[in-house]
Amino acid sequence: MDLKECAFQIIEEVKKAANPKQYIKESIRFDRGKREICVEDKIFAAHGHIYVVAVGKAAPLMTEGLLEVLGSSVEKGYMVI
């Protein structure tokens, strides 16, 4: 493998490691029965409607990851990109 191929491989691996969608999916859990959202080591009660708000360049990927975790429990969402 030449230097250019090696550099592109490194860039691809860094992009995978810095993927906001994957980070959200690994950091957030949702207990549908208890209606609790667990963010790393904190637990939040999810009474009533669940709305998603995402801001920034990574908003679309973060939202995709969160929708995979929360699924149909999300009532509405807003993104500012």
Image (cartoon, grey):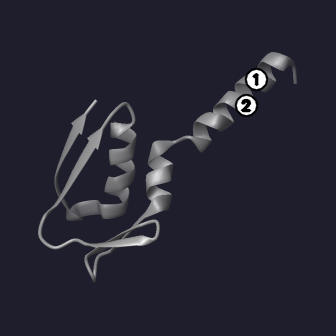
Q: How many marks?
A: 2
Q: In which quarter of the image is the C terminus?
A: top left
* Residue depicted at x 56% and y 40%: 18
Q: Position of residue 24 (x, y in %)?
A: 44, 53
Q: Where is residue 5 in the image (x, y as percent from the top left)?
A: 78, 22
Q: Which residue lies furthest to the front in this view?
A: 42
Contact check, label 1 and label 2, Cβ < 8 Å:
yes
Going by the numbered disc 1, the residue's amino acid type is Ala
* Residue depicted at x 87% and y 19%: 2
Closer to the camera, 20 or 67? 20
Left or right placement of residue 75 versus residue 8 in this view = left
* Residue depicted at x 59% and y 35%: 15
According to the picture, the residue beneath numbered tag 2 turns out to be: 10
Going by the numbered disc 2, the residue's amino acid type is Ile
According to the picture, the residue beneath numbered tag 1 turns out to be: 7
Q: How far apart are marks 1 and 2 (CA)?
A: 5 Å
